Amino acid sequence: MNVVIVGLGNLGSAVATVLARNGHQVMAWEFNQAVVDELNQQHSNSAYLPAVAMPKTIAATSDSQQLPLAGADALIITLPSRFIEQTLAGLTLPAGLPIVNMSKGMNPENGETVCQTLQRLFPNNTLAQLSGPSIANEFVAGVITAFVAASSCHSLQQSLAQLFNNDSLSVQFSTDIVGVELGGIFKNCYALGLGIVGQHAVAGLNFSGAFLTLALQEMRSLAVAMGAQASTFDGLACIGDLIATALSDNSHNRKMGQLLAQGLSLAQIEQQLGVLAEGYKTLATMLPLAQQHGVTLPLAQLINELIEGRLSLDNFCKGFNALLKSPC
Ligand SMILES: NC(=O)C1=CN([C@@H]2O[C@H](COP(=O)(O)OP(=O)(O)OC[C@H]3O[C@@H](n4cnc5c(N)ncnc54)[C@H](O)[C@@H]3O)[C@@H](O)[C@H]2O)C=CC1
Ligand SMILES: O=C(CO)COP(=O)(O)O
């Protein structure tokens, strides 16, 4: 199959690599010309996917007009959410080209999820959210990984299985695009929070177990109020992704939490990570959304106060302990 990938950051490079290894033809757009040149000349991406030999068949460009959209079977979006609208707004897509979103974020200005933005920009193209516990550095290294392809289009789900399935990668199906996307978005806030608190003496696995349980309850209540199916939260795209992201040392959100706990400023973190992890902006978007939907998110509120410096780590732990004394 022929695939166009938008964004050769950590996720996009890993996706390009596994699809090319599966024998598919991959062409990618990338913002950073140095990344494009390295990929085309040395078949590597030292900035975003160090120490991985990328297949020579992958080609990249920073000129979106060069993308072979007319002959493509899927357009896969792997950019951080904040760059998606500005990058895609000028593109004209063939009417039948399916769009697959793998980004997990929201627009803080209008509260839209990435899928909602894509639907607004390209109302005539079918859409899938491809999500699940899928840390790029792991699945590119052959770690067993299962994705969820959420779409109302069965043939698009089948195409995604055909693209990704191999000895270590599997694609499951869902029709709950809202739940699958929101699970992947909301868990980032809690992974960031656990990254901060993980540095505290109280934070053993008992603590993490309680934290993630409460996180899942909050994610589910807000997402259901926004139209998701509750049962989606028992699956890979929600509890699965929450566990993987919050506990993985490869997670950008967990890492950002750790850097905040070490006292780094947002500017220093942006310099180190390249882009602030999605959970940071999502938290600020999620809390007003919850209020709008009449849902309370006490753990997310505590994390927000901690990040904004209105709560010390000790007082966060006291507040968290108090939440555990309330009936669920
Ligand atoms: N890295 C991972 O393991 C996974 C990430 N995701 C999601 O994928 C999305 C991308 O994450 P990562 O690949 O980790 O990000 P990253 O930080 O590795 O990549 C950043 C990308 O943004 C590009 N960029 C920077 N400035 C830009 C601009 N002004 N315009 C357009 N592009 C620009 C960079 O060139 C690079 O391609 C996020 O929404 C994340 O939640 C989802 C699953 C796994
Ligand atoms: O969503 C992810 C894994 O499924 C990756 O999350 P990070 O952006 O925190 O690395």
Image: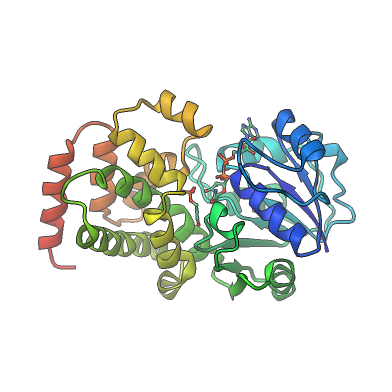
Q: Nearer the viewer, residue 57 or 253?
A: 57
Badge count: 0
Q: x and y percent of residue 209 in the render?
A: 26, 63
Left/right of residue 275 with respect to residue 65 in the rendered view: left
Q: x and y percent of residue 299 in the render?
A: 25, 52
Q: Nearer the viewer, residue 315 or 289?
A: 315
In the image, is residue 262 above or below residue 52? above
Q: Residue at x 52, y 34 (%)?
A: 275
Query: In the picture, which quadrant includes the C terminus?
Result: bottom left
Q: x and y percent of residue 19 in the render?
A: 73, 60
Q: Residue at x 30, y 64 (%)?
A: 217
Left/right of residue 232 with respect to residue 298 in the rendered view: right
Residue 125 visible in the shown view: no
Query: In the picture, which quadrant includes the N terminus?
Result: bottom right
Occupied quadrant, residue 147: bottom right
Q: x and y percent of residue 132 in the render?
A: 52, 63
Residue 13 visible in the shown view: yes
Q: Residue at x 15, y 57 (%)?
A: 323
Q: Nearer the viewer, residue 68 or 124?
A: 68
Colour scheme of the picture: rainbow
Q: Residue at x 27, y 53 (%)?
A: 297
Occupied quadrant, residue 215: bottom left
